[in-house]
Image: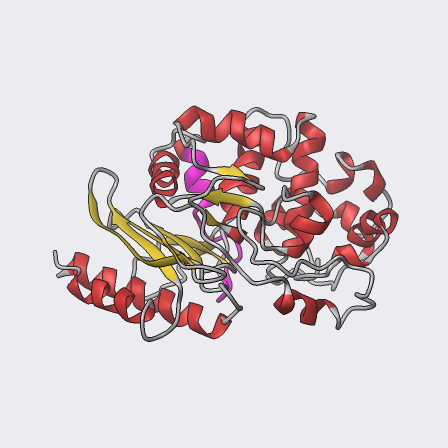
Amino acid sequence: MSFKSLDALLVDYTTTRNIAGCVCCVASMKEIFFFHAYGYAQVEPSRVKLNKNTIFDLASLTKPLATALAVMQLCEEKRMNLSDTVQRYLPAFKKSINGEKTIKELLLHTSGMPAWFPLYILPSEKRIPFLANTNKGGHHVVYSCLGYIVLGMIIEAVTHMPLDQYCRTNIYEKIGARKMFFGPTQQRNVAATERGNQHEKQLAARFGDIGHVLWRDHVIKGEVHDGNAHYCFQGVSGNAGLFSNASDLLLIARQYCAGTIVRAETVQMMTRDWTGTQNKRGLGWVMDAYHGVLSDRAFSHTGFTGTLFVADPEQDVIILLLTNVVHPVVRPELTAALRNKVVQEVSSAVSA
């Protein structure tokens, strides 16, 4: 099993293609086949080399590895059901269009809630009414950060605990994942993200007045990159906020697939296609995203900061890629191509 081509690809991207750095791990349930670090945790204001223990902002990997896992644990404990409506747990959503949406619809991104909105441009008292009443209609898949923000609020309402505390106590500490946590963090070995929030600032300006927002202008490091998570929820949100290094990410991948965090039948429920469309969705996961490269049982998720989690139970392979492609400026055009090439290289290596 040779990973020379994968190694060459990652060297290329972290030198000639200007990605600051990355950590890549390829493993099975019992072995590690490839585990290397490349480049820098930050390149400004000074250069800091990264290593295999560097902690990254996982961005939207928070959705499956915190929010969806917490929901499914609570379903196993019969503290909630997938068919329950939002208004059952959040009184502020009663008699609203999104109050009638179900936990399942939010998990699958089929609730009709919009993909994104900069909640922080609204006065704090108007944010919940906006979340309760804003809906595009329909039941097709629309990947919605807002839906997962609502799920995070539901978890807190059910457990009477902050989301980060619930996940730490009931998921991460139980499996020994000591480097998986919600920020902010003062730890030094952390990969930097964007210099300020210029990318999100430009997006938010399309939705209204942004002049009152106290935009960050420093190199973001150890605090969540996502604006809603940072400005509205102090770094702890159902859509973003989780940090980890590759070792703990591999640990949670293995424990999850083994049925340790939630039961094996729950894992099977979460990692099947529920939507029956080209945009296949599991409960928290994207299904069969690498059709023809991995098996149709493969499930995955990505994060805006440059993160990737893929698990293929049929081939017994786990692919983890942590990059800081948004440092020092956001370059989304680089991310998808790199992820696809990494998955293709791993598939070629394990099937050779």
Left/right of residue 285 with respect to residue 231 in the rendered view: left
Left/right of residue 333 with respect to residue 337 in the rendered view: right
Does residue 133 appear anywhere in the picture?
yes
> Is 77 above or below relative to 34?
above
Percent from the top left, x then y, of residue 212?
82, 60
Magenta range is 265-279
Residue at 82% x, 43% y is 93
Left/right of residue 78 with respect to residue 8 in the rendered view: right
> Is 231 above or below relative to 332?
above
Residue at 49% x, 55% y is 192
Left/right of residue 351 with respect to residue 130 in the rendered view: left
Task: Please identify the quarter of the rendering in which residue 164 is found.
Answer: top right
Percent from the top left, x then y, of residue 326?
50, 64
Q: How many marks?
A: 0
Residue closer to the observer: 163 or 200: 200
Residue at 46% x, 43% y is 188
Does residue 283 appear anywhere in the picture?
no
Quadrant containing the C terminus in the rendered view: bottom left
Residue at 66% x, 31% y is 162
Task: Please identify the quarter of the rendering in which residue 348 is found.
Answer: bottom left
- Asked whether 21 falls inside the magenta stretch, the response is no
Percent from the top left, x then y, of residue 246?
36, 45
Principal secondary structure, stretch drawn in magenta:
loop
